[in-house]
């Protein structure tokens, strides 16, 4: 079952649409990487999921129930979140902040302790939050979100201000939570920060969903270039001239956007025309490349 | 000092005026004018000295002003200062300024210049309004120009000193409760100042409101006095020196987050 | 696991740690009583009517302006941390219902206001006994007035809380409090008694003038007058809290 589903989720201010017609599907127990450049509408979308902002059109369903101003306080009991800047009262210590959360939500000591240990903040609890580094504030914010033991966790750029070791810790934490059945939605404008943790992706650009699906589907969505190794790349290029766009790169010929069937015919044609060929391969492709293709290079 | 730093004062002040947009400082200044004029008017028309149209003098509205200015000014000056400084606390403006070469001290000085301009304008409007309303109310006696001008200038000076104090206070202490709480206590001192002995009036900036009052009631009788020019002069000199000292100390402090 | 109101109120009071709220709560009434007594001592007068005069000097001006402004400052203080960083998002993302948040904030402010009245009462008794050597104790009707004041700070607490919830600025709601107090003082001086049912600031100010014979007060503490204060407090507070909750419930967070 999907933990989060939205139908035609839209937010506009005046004539300007910030988020347009989003149909999100976030399966239960996955880590959903919500990617997109700054200003693409990620935060606004997350705020609509939490009913912090009311959609101009469309609906949000969380765990099968509608999420709106009438239902939100009930729904929010099982949702932990961290949106934009991390929360925390600067004039109080980290421990005092957590006790406020504990008291107002009626949590027990063990729940708070588990949250603190999960983000490794145990040794910093007696310090005033005003003196925390951004990374420590982020951890405190995540601990506050985790303390209520949510079934859905919504984190907006949680790795902001963290060093590489801290980022790795958060990734590990997200995977651990997901393995226990918690659904995690995590946004970032940097793919590298969450690609190893996430198994589902949603890619947003200018308020529209460019892609949504599993990691495998994401790779399939962007076909990598075919590289043909030949000592005579110019001759080979001339054979295909007019039919395909090709580029000569040293001892090989690069052809973009062709599937396996076309690749087979290209090879047959080249061999038929007497071009010497000693290798045909698809380029190694990282998730980063796919992301760039989808956002900047391709359809934007 | 390089030419760049000296030349940069202009843009900093212009920026301060730009920041006034949406801060409703004009509205607060308007409240100050309105409150002062309304209180003056109220105390004037309810005064026994004002009952007989034939013997109406300017002393009555001047007594009203002498009461209304200390009543209204201290807290609203604290509000103006807090509004202007708090945006830097909230928006991390101290750090942003420092990294672009505008030191916190320079920022405070620019704010004094900006807010000071607003306060000067408000003072001029207040006194002109009282004069105009007095004429409308049928005060035909000649205007005591010297006395009135003396009061206008000295009370403005006290207002500017209080404003400078509040700018420093709001900048220094992030918790704005401190600044506004002191503004509130200042109002009490300003209002009760005339009932206290002279040394007490000299002890705090707010006490000087009672030293610049030019008219007041002693029992049933309305009496006029010249403002204590010397005291105000000393206050202004002292305050200016302290303001420069404190704001230049801000400059040497490490950037705050 | 819907949290109780007392838990939320406890949380609110917890947030006031290290916030200097005590300085307003304790200093303001002390300074007011001190100012009244100091003037009396300096002018070498006697308290013409004993305890009554001392009460008058301590409470009349205090009730017109400083009390209202003090409540305004406390309201801004209580809401200030919520307007910082990610706290607003966090506050609106908890299962605590909006009504309970608004109510808890109002009660926290009113509680501080109630303590202010107690400090004032104690300060009056102490200065009366130690400084002026007044015979006996403060007449019991002033205890009753103090009890009424504890209730009558609620409407101003509610309206200032609503303003400080709506505006990020610390100082702007305090300026509004000054305007409210000014209008209240003028209306009461003009003996427009009905204003207490309309303007919260006037209601609180009116309650402080009970039994003083100033600003439209008869000088007597009557059952009818007291009842009017209590009823108006209840009605205005509930109305303001309801409106603030409704407004907050419909409002979006900043994007």
Image (cartoon, rainbow, N blue to C red):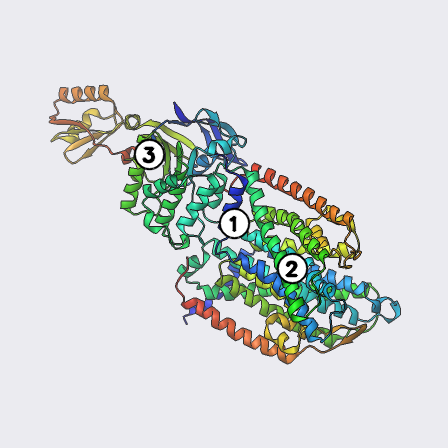
Query: Pointer 2 indicates a residue of which chain?
Result: C
Query: Pointer 3 indicates a residue of which chain?
Result: A
A292, B173: nearer the viewer: B173
Counting other residues with Cα less than 10 Å from the Cα at mark 2, is it few (<14), some (14-19), or many (20 or more)? many
What is the x, y in percent for residue A241? Answer: 23, 26
Same chain for the residues under marks 3 and 2 in the image = no
- Residue carrying label 2: C121
Look at the numbered disc 2 and give the secondary structure of its residue: helix
Look at the numbered disc 3 and give the secondary structure of its residue: helix
- Residue carrying label 1: C13
Disc 2 to disc 1, C-alpha distance: 23 Å
B116, A98: nearer the viewer: A98
- Using the rendered view, name the quadrant where residue A33 is placed: top left
What is the x, y in percent for residue C213? Answer: 78, 59
Nearer the camera: disc 3 or disc 1: 1
Q: Residue at x 39, y 35 (%)?
A: A149
- Residue carrying label 3: A177
**Rendered view: B188 above or below A112:** below
Relative placement, left or right, of B201 versus A18 is right
C200, A105: nearer the viewer: A105
- Using the rendered view, name the quadrant where residue A170 is placed: top left
Look at the numbered disc 1 and give the secondary structure of its residue: helix
């Amino acid at each position: 079952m999907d933990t989060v589903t939205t139908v035609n989720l839209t937010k506009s201010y005046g004539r300007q649409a910030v988020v347009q017609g989003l149909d999100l599907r976030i399966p239960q127990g996955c880590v959903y990487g919500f990617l997109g450049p700054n200003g693409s509408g990620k935060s606004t979308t997350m705020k609509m999921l939490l009913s912090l902002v009311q959609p101009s059109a469309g609906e949000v369903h969380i765990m099968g129930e509608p999420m709106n101003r009438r239902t939100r306080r009930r729904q929010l009991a099982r949702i932990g979140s961290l949106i934009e800047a991390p929360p925390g009262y600067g004039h109080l210590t980290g421990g005092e902040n957590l006790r406020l959360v504990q008291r107002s939500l009626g949590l027990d000591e063990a729940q708070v302790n588990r949250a603190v240990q999960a983000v490794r903040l145990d040794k910093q609890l007696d310090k005033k939050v005003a003196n925390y580094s951004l990374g420590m504030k982020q951890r405190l914010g995540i601990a506050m979100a985790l303390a209520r033991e949510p079934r859905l966790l919504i984190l907006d750029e949680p790795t902001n201000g963290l060093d590489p070791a801290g980022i790795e810790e958060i990734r590990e934490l997200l995977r651990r939570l997901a393995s226990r059945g918690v659904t995690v939605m995590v946004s970032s404008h940097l793919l590298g920060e969450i690609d190893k943790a996430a198994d589902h992706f949603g890619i947003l650009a200018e308020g529209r969903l460019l892609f949504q699906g599993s990691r495998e589907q994401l790779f399939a969505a962007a076909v990598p270039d075919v590289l043909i190794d030949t000592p005579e790349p110019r001759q080979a290029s001339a054979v295909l001239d007019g039919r395909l766009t090709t580029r000569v790169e040293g001892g090989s010929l690069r052809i973009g956007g062709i599937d396996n069937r076309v690749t087979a015919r290209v090879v047959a044609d080249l061999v038929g025309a007497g071009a010497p060929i000693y290798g045909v391969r698809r380029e190694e492709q990282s998730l980063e490349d796919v992301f760039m293709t989808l956002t900047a290079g391709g359809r934007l | 000092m390089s030419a760049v730093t000296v030349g940069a004062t202009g843009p900093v002040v212009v920026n301060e005026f730009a920041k006034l947009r949406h801060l409703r400082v004009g509205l607060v200044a308007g409240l100050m004018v309105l409150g002062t004029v309304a209180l003056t008017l109220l105390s004037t028309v309810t005064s026994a000295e004002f009952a007989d149209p034939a013997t109406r003098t300017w002393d009555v509205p001047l007594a009203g002003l002498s009461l209304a200015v200390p009543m209204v000014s201290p807290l609203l000056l604290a509000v103006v200062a807090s509004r202007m400084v708090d945006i830097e606390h909230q928006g991390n403006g101290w750090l942003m300024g420092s990294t672009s070469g505008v030191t916190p001290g320079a920022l405070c000085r620019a704010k004094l210049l900006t807010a000071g301009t607003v306060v000067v304008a408000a003072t001029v409007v207040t006194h002109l309004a009282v004069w105009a309303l007095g004429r409308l109310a049928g005060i035909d006696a000649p205007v005591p120009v010297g006395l009135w001008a003396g009061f206008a200038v000295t009370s403005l000076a006290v207002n500017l000193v209080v404003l400078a104090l509040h700018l420093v206070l709001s900048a220094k202490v992030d918790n704005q409760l401190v600044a506004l709480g002191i503004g509130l206590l200042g109002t009490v001192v300003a209002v009760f100042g005339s009932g206290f002995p002279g040394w007490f009036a000299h002890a705090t900036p707010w006490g000087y409101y009672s030293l610049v009052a030019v008219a007041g009631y002693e029992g049933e009788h309305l009496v006029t006095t010249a403002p204590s020019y010397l005291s105000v002069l000393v206050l202004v000199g002292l305050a200016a020196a302290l303001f420069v000292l404190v704001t230049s100390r801000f400059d040497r402090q490490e950037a705050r987050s | 696991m819907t949290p109780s109101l007392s838990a939320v109120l406890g949380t609110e009071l917890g947030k006031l740690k290290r916030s200097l709220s005590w300085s307003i709560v304790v200093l303001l009434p002390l300074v007011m009583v001190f100012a009244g007594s100091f003037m009396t001592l300096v002018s070498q007068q006697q308290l013409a009517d004993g305890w009554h005069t001392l009460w008058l000097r301590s409470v009349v001006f205090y009730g017109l302006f400083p009390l209202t402004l003090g409540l305004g400052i406390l309201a801004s203080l209580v809401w200030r941390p919520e307007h910082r960083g990610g706290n607003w998002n966090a506050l609106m993302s908890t299962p605590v219902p909006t009504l309970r948040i608004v109510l808890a904030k109002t009660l926290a402010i009113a509680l501080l206001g109630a303590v202010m009245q107690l400090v004032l009462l104690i300060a009056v008794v102490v200065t009366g006994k130690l400084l002026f050597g007044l015979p006996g104790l403060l007449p019991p009707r002033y205890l009753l007035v103090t009890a009424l004041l504890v209730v009558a700070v609620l409407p101003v607490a509610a309206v200032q809380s609503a303003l400080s919830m709506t505006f990020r600025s610390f100082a702007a709601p305090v300026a509004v409090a000054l305007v409210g107090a000014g209008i209240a003082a003028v209306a009461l001086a003009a003996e427009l008694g009905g204003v207490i049912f309309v303007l919260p600031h006037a209601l609180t100010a009116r309650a402080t003038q009970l039994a003083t014979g100033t600003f439209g007060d008869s000088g007597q503490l009557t059952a009818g007058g007291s009842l009017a204060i209590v009823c108006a407090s209840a009605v205005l507070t509930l109305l303001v809290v309801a409106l603030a909750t409704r407004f907050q419930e419909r409002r979006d967070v900043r994007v």
